[in-house]
Image (tube, rainbow, N blue to C red):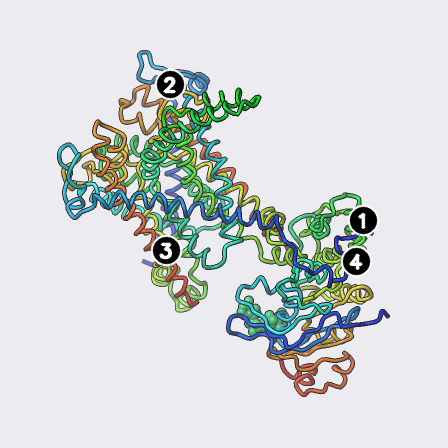
Amino acid sequence: MVEEKNIFEIKNFNVWYGDFQAVKDVNLNISSNRITAIIGPSGCGKSTLLRAMNRMNDLITSSRTSGQMLFHNIDIYDKNTDVIELRRRVGMVFQKPNPFPSSVYENVAYGPKLRGIKKKSALDEIVEQALIKADLWKEVKDKLNDSGLSLSGGQMQRLCIARSLAQQPEVILFDEPTSALDPISTAHIENLLQELQKTVTIVIVTHNMQQAARISHYTAFMYLGELIEFGNTDTIFVNPANKLTEEYITGRFG
Amino acid sequence: MKWQTKERLVEISVSSIGLLSVIVLLLIGFFLFKEAFYIFYKEGVIRVIFGSQWYPTHEPPDFGMFPLIAGTIAVTLLTSIMAIPLGLGTAIYIAEVANHKVKEFLKPLIEMLASFPSVVLGFFGMVIIAPILSNWLSPILSEKLPEMLRNTNLPFISTTLADFCYDKLFIASGLNITTASLMLTVRAIPVIASIAEDALTAVPRTYREASYSLGADKWHTIWKVVIPASVSGLSVAVILGIGTIIGETMIVLMVAGGAAVVPHWIFDAARPMPAAIAAEMAEAPYKSLHYHALFGVGAILFLITFVLSMISDFISRKYRSVRIGEKV
Amino acid sequence: MHTIENMNKPFELACKRKLNIKQGFFLSLIRTLGFSGAITLFLILSFVFYNGFQVLSWEFITEPPIDAMTKGGIFPVIMGTILLTILCMVLVIPVGVITAIFLAEYSKPGVMLKSVMMSIYTLAGVPSVVFGLFGLGVFVVMLNFGTSLLAGSMTLAIMILPYIISTSEEALKAVPYSFKEASLACGATKWQTIWKVVLPTAMPGILTGAILGTAKVSGETAPIMFTAAAFFSPGVPRSVFEPVMALPYHIYVLATAGTHIEETRPIQYGTALVLIVIVLAMNLLGIILRLKQRKKRAW
Ligand SMILES: Nc1ncnc2c1ncn2[C@@H]1O[C@H](COP(=O)(O)OP(=O)(O)OP(=O)(O)O)[C@@H](O)[C@H]1O
Ligand SMILES: [Mg+2]
């Protein structure tokens, strides 16, 4: 395995929506080339924390942060940080697959075009590579010009992953990527994540405890905006240090 | 009476009143074409529509509507050039760029502008814009500017361009199709802006999220994602805006200059179709050829707006089916 | 593999915020365009208010015109517009609301619904001068109402019908299904439910639509030009079969016809001011009502 280092360091990090504090004093390190899962009951701030990692919460006007969110030791909330470059390196895949209402090809080429790649041959190659990496190439290579919305749910989600991969990100953030999918598509995506983890750092929010246990190396458990426990997935699931964590993973609440 | 019978009666009465708008539309169409028929029958469709002489009160009269149609086309084109970018720009600003407070302020304002009486716009054009054009702009553009250009002694600029300004930028009367188009623009902006704003707002938030998460900036997201996703709604806005321009009466009646000749230049006067109806109907004797001719103009106007409504209805239907076909 | 700009640079070196000239340019352009409407409205309003205030007085709005309309007030003109608008609304609201009830509650998918919806959509796009022609032919001549308050109001009613239908339909459709369920579950019939539950709940929305419709109607000129408007009438009409003066038509006539155009400028400004105040007041009222309803809607 590739050597791991802390690609994200989150220090005393808080997020507010107006007066409501959704993330409270979180300290967390994300290791490169590993899968980190964030679990916790609904409304505990998982999505909020995840969206803070590539500043998608900038889009919510009422939101405000404090503390440090270091990516490669750079505070991404520093006013001099280029949020565009950040989001290029830290991609995101959402709960509901959200391809653009354009062709499969255009969906994947969106990012590279954004970065100024115009040559058709170059784009073709990037699109193909990204689709191969997202394990979608075989299924769509004959319908690259079909609408992205004509694919099945699982295919759409892999299209969204390919779209992110086309920009060669360092990290991809997944917010419950399989909760809208059937079990077979879910298994497909889980396999894909394990494959991707060799080259990309993955942070995944999930409600599915088995999923976290199956695929992640590290697990963070959040409750009411606080990070309760963080550690090796095996340790967390087999031998949790905190009472709350134990109750949650054994399904006694939430 | 049994309650079932009562309910049935209510349903029948409600439904028949519901049909009233169909009947009204059919009546309007029927009546217009009935009254218009005679002029086309008497003078011939081609001669009426393409005839270039509109002298309805001469002896013998001429009912060539082409100058009126050309007037409408001219002001519509000129207005579209200004109103479409301004209207769409306003919509994009309100829907995508403005913050919440500005939005809450601008939206009702646009709505107010939409119900602003057009007679007041015409009045404003007459007493403010027209004098500005003829008394102030014209001397600058057709006297001072050519003189300055001539003094440069540069090839082309001191000759051809200077002559052009001297000839073409002289504004004999402020009541012309440019003034009319300026006021029509004010009329059309809110129509285009409010429909376009709805179309933009209807674009799912997830599209924007996807774009931003890929590191696109705001402008790129608007241009490459939001606008393409709402292009059908935006075209409906443009089409209905054009319909408003074509049918608007008071502005063209008051400031287009009134000359029933084909305009050749932006400072020429014109008599667009609605202006002809409004100006002449009062004097046209009942059932005279002139009366029928004006109904003919009305029928053409009705037909144009009818077709525009059909097109925009077709587009928005198609657009809706795309949104339903979207699986997630 | 083709490399993306900054791809191989470490984040530390690539993360400096870049000046985004293109975005800056286009967003400022859009910002400017966005305010164009507001600025125009402001300019025209200040023109009307500045000039109109100088003639406005108690006498101006309570006295009839004198000396071939070159002096005096505009009382009959204001009354004419108010009467036209009220009569128009009295005629159009029942028809509009019932049509909306048909669309929202009784219609079934099919040819009939489709044609009703198409007609409403098309009617909304018909130019107002065409309604004027129709009113002239049918109400003034065929039904022999003459150029009259009634003919004008009916013409305006047909013109505003699509607007009233669609605002009422929207209000009716905003009534939550659970309200209807509750009433039906109590053993009420469909019509009783509509009459006792749906209509009252939708009433504020319907009224708001009607008020905004009033604003549109009172500023219209073309539909009343040959159906209702009189160049001069000494006072308030005694019956609906008499012609009336109206604010928009008065502005038009004074500003374009006759030999006293310059002389009557002040009256034109004053009339425009009164018209604008009525239209804007109605608009504001409608907008405020709508905001209030949006806040209050707890369901
Ligand atoms: N845009 C917003 N404005 C205000 N409050 C918000 C907003 N988004 C989320 N919240 C609140 O912040 C808290 C955390 O929300 P978040 O979406 O991060 O939870 P989550 O852990 O992802 O929950 P779920 O598992 O249901 O997705 C919740 O209480 C939520 O109500
Ligand atoms: Mg969430």
Q: Is residue C74 visible?
A: yes
Dot 2 corresponds to which residue?
B54
Distance between mark 1 and mark 3 Cα atoms? 55 Å
Can you say whether A224 is above or below B228 in the image? Answer: below
Q: Residues within 10 Å of mark 3 (few under 14, many from 20)?
A: many
Residue at mark 1: chain: A
| Residue C154: quarter of image | top left
Distance between mark 1 and mark 2 Cα atoms? 65 Å
C17, C62: nearer the viewer: C17
Mark drawn on residue A98: none
Dot 3 corresponds to which residue?
C287
Q: Amino acid at mark 2?
A: Trp
* Left or right position of B77 against A67: left
Dot 1 corresponds to which residue?
A125
Can you say whether B49 is above or below A95 in the image? Answer: above
Q: Amino acid at mark 4?
A: Asn
